Image (tube, rainbow, N blue to C red):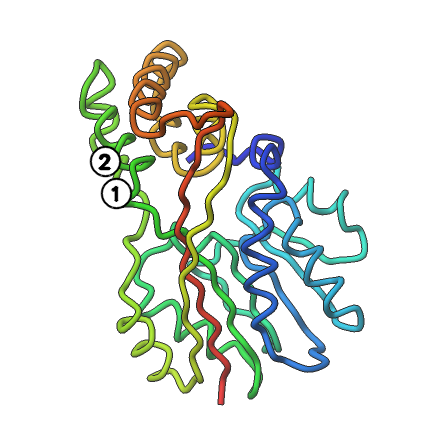
């Protein structure tokens, strides 16, 4: 995919940061020395880690140059760098590995998550949050719009860009086998937004990217119009004019024995 846009992502910064706060609140590591934010994006979640663990060496990695440059400006006291999480293997273990809204883009969690656990110190924690919204109207509408228009062939594989989320049982088994105590929960956030166009803007920086990147400017405009029309039907306006975006998210905190 093309590079991610930090500016587009941060249009909904407060809403996107809230799950990071909830995830971090369940991390029980005392006085960690080394902390890393995998898929750190523009540094909003890394900033939370730096505040929570002021005495730790805090790092962030991301595959997007634009995100990394924005994160460096936001948090000059942390260390940021480019990395592909799929092949990331640190030279030294970490006390906290934090990954907010990134693992859904990576395949084979049954192999990936134990590898990340192996990069923890004893007593260290792997903290993960993933959107669990592929069955929500927002994402069903993407697939429907992709299959109904002149962009159909170009978007034939777009729906497969995201890794389907495992069951609670599946993740529990994977992380227990890796030698962890496991905390699993799911929260459905309900975001009041200013109409269907705002929902489209929200997903332009995340879920819509596999659908937008392959298209020319003209086809992109047509696809977004078709998607927004479906969103308007799926998310009716409330009496005050806002629409309510339901957003389920799965949380995992695995503490290495």
Residue 132 in the image: state x and y as whole percent.
35, 52
Which is more toward the observer, 173 or 151? Answer: 173
The mark found on residue 160 in the picture is: 1
Q: Alpha-carbon distance for marks 1 and 2?
A: 6 Å
Q: Position of residue 104 (x, y in %)?
A: 38, 53
Residue 46 lies in quadrant: bottom right
Q: Residues within 10 Å of mark 1 (few under 14, many from 20)?
A: few
Rendered view: 107 above or below 212: below
From this viewpoint, which residue is outermost toward the front? 239
**Mark carried by residue 123:** none
Whole-percent x, y for residue 4 in the image = 52, 36
| Residue at x-position 46% and y-position 44% | 190
Which circle marks residue 157 in the picture?
2
Q: How many marks?
A: 2
Please, is residue 135 above or below residue 137 in the view? Answer: below
Q: Secondary structure at mark 1?
A: helix
Q: Residue at x 44, y 30 (%)?
A: 243
Q: Residue 171's image quarter? A: bottom left
Residue lying farthest top? 218
| Location of residue 253 in the rendering, given as x and y in whole percent from the top left corner | 48, 73
User: Is the Cβ of the residue at disc 1 closer than 8 Å to that at disc 2?
Assistant: yes
Classify residue 30 by image quadrant. bottom right
Q: Is residue 225 left or right of residue 26?
A: left
Q: Is residue 115 left or right of residue 70?
A: left
Residue positioned 27% across, 65% down in the render: 167
């Amino acid at each position: 995919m093309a590079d991610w846009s930090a500016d587009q992502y941060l249009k909904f910064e407060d809403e996107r940061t809230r799950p990071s706060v909830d995830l971090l609140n369940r991390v029980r590591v005392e006085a960690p020395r080394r902390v890393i934010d995998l898929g750190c994006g523009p540094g909003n979640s890394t900033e939370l880690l730096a505040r929570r663990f002021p005495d730790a060496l805090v790092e962030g990695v991301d595959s997007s140059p634009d995100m990394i440059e924005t994160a460096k400006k936001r948090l000059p006291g942390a260390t940021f760098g480019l990395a592909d999480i799929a092949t990331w293997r640190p030279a030294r273990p970490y006390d906290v590995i934090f990954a907010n809204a990134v693992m859904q883009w990576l395949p084979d969690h049954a192999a990936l998550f134990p590898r990340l656990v192996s990069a923890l110190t004893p007593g260290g924690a792997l903290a993960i949050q993933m959107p669990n919204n592929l069955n929500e109207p927002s994402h069903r509408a993407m697939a429907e719009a992709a299959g109904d228009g002149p962009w159909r062939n170009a978007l034939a594989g777009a729906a497969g860009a995201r890794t389907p989320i495992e069951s609670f049982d599946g993740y529990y088994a994977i992380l227990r086998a890796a030698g962890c105590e496991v905390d699993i929960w799911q929260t459905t956030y309900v975001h009041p937004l200013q109409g269907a166009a705002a929902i489209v803007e929200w997903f332009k920086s995340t879920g819509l990217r596999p659908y937008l990147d392959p298209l020319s400017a003209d086809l992109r405009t047509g696809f977004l119009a078709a998607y927004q029309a479906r969103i308007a039907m799926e998310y009716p306006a409330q009496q005050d004019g806002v629409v309510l975006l339901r957003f389920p998210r799965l949380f995992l905190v695995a503490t290495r024995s």
